[in-house]
Image (cartoon, rainbow, N blue to C red):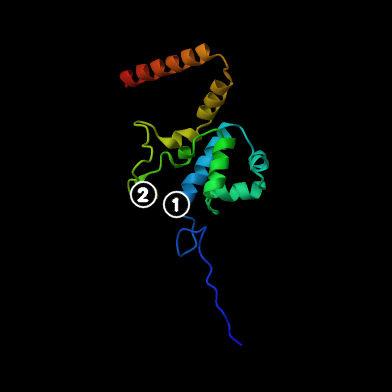
Amino acid sequence: MTTIVVKRRRGSRGSPDGKPNPIDIHVGSRVRLRRTLLGMSQEKLGEAIGLTFQQVQKYERGANRIGASRLFELSRVLDVPVSFFFDDMNAETSGGRVPGMSEATPGFDSKDLSKREILELARAFDRIKDEKVRKSVLELTKSLSRTVSEAS
């Protein structure tokens, strides 16, 4: 009798030691960021794309790789372009500069997005439906940030 040995591919793992790929972790963190900015639970996101909340957790941790079709579906549900999931990726994560990838906005520290005030501000701004009011609030915010920057 012949024994056949089948090697399993490491499709969802980025390194031989079984740790998640840094890009998968980054993409998952961007899914989490957008979901929380929208005030959506993992369960609600899972329902919207036909997954359990546990699978959403695995995606957000980078434990499971998100396929292209699923990433496209997530972009539609979370109302962002697919490129959003790769924004602010540093050279270390991407293994160097990736041509065509969005560059981080100068003076922007993505760690600031974890601050509760930023989330509250984004949610409140999103609830403003009048375009003129939204534009005025945005211009006021820009003006205030310039004033603070100049005073420093």
Q: In which quadrant of the rendered view does residue 152 lie?
A: top left
- Residue ID at (58%, 17%): 129
Closer to the camera, 82 or 57?
A: 82
Q: Nearer the viewer, residue 58 or 1?
A: 1
Q: Which residue is mark 1?
A: 22
Q: Give the vertical position of 87 relative to 6 (above or below).
A: above
Q: What residue is drawn where x is 57% and y is 41%?
A: 73
What is the spatial separation of the Cα atoms under label 2 and label 1, in whole angstroms? Answer: 9 Å
As displayed, is residue 142 above or below residue 17?
A: above
Which part of the image, by quadrant, shows the N terminus? bottom right
Number of numbered tags placed on the structure image: 2
Whether residue 44 is situated above or below residue 51 in the rendered picture: above
Side of 107 relative to 48 (left or right): left
Left or right of 43: which side holds 81?
A: left
Which residue bears the numbered disc 2?
Answer: 92
N-terminal of the pair, mark 2 or mark 1, is 1
Q: Are marks 2 and 1 in contact (CB under 8 Å)?
A: yes
* SS at badge 2: helix
Lateral position of residue 100 relative to residue 22, left or right: left
Mark 1 secondary-structure assignment: helix
Amino acid beneath label 1: Pro
Image point 45% across, 61% down: which residue? Answer: 15
Q: Position of residue 40 (x, y in %)?
A: 62, 35
Residue at the image point whose x is 35% and y is 31% from the top = 107
**Amino acid residing under circle 2:** Glu
Q: Residues within 10 Å of mark 2 (few under 14, many from 20)?
A: few
Image coordinates of residue 26 in percent, x first then y, are: 47, 46
Q: From this viewpoint, which residue is outermost toward the bottom?
A: 1
For the residue pair 106 and 148, the one nearer the viewer reads as 106
| Left or right position of 86 against 131 | left
Spot occupied by residue 27 in the image (x, y as percentages of width and height) = 49, 45
Pinpoint residue 121: horizontal percent, then vertical percent. 53, 24
